[in-house]
Every structure is written in structure tokens, then in C-alpha cells.
Image: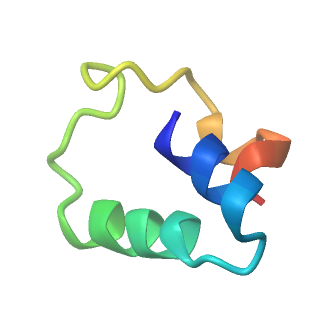
Amino acid sequence: MINYLLQAIDKTNSFSDKLRELLDRFPNVDTKAMGFPMDWESEPLWK
């Protein structure tokens, strides 16, 4: 939801990149438990 709203406000925001970097830095974080669907990074919203 946050990314969707940020994209609506400013298409050039870097939230997606920063989130990916953070999740890469902490691989033990369970994105499924956070509510992310499998293969969430391939969704158009995150590209």
C-alpha cells in the first residue's frame, strides 16, 4: 500500500529500491509472514 501511494504522489521515489536493498541485507526476514505474495518483485508495482 505504501509503495502504491508513493507511486501515485511521485513516480521517481526510490522506496522499491530501498526496500529491496533492505531485504537483501537481512535475508532472514520472512516476506511471506509480512504479507508479500510469492514472486512479489515481478509485480509491475515493484518495477
Residue closest to the eye, 43 or 27: 43
Q: Quadrant of residue 5?
A: top right
Q: Is residue 22 left or right of residue 40?
A: left
Residue closest to the eye, 38 or 12: 12
Q: Position of residue 7 (x, y in %)?
A: 71, 57
**Residue depicted at x 69% and y 61%:** 9
How is the structure coloured here? rainbow
Residue at the farthest right position: 44
Residue 15, relative to residue 28: is it above or below? below
Q: Is residue 45 left or right of residue 20?
A: right
**Residue depicted at x 18% and y 44%:** 29
Residue 22, relative to residue 6: is it above or below? below
**Residue depicted at x 33% and y 33%:** 31
Marks counted in the figure total 0
Q: Position of residue 22 (x, y in %)?
A: 29, 69
Q: Position of residue 15 (x, y in %)?
A: 50, 68
The C terminus: image quadrant: bottom right
**Residue depicted at x 56% and y 78%:** 14
Residue at the farthest front position: 9
Q: Position of residue 35 (x, y in %)?
A: 38, 19
Residue 46, relative to residue 18: is it above or below? above
Q: Is residue 28 left or right of residue 3?
A: left
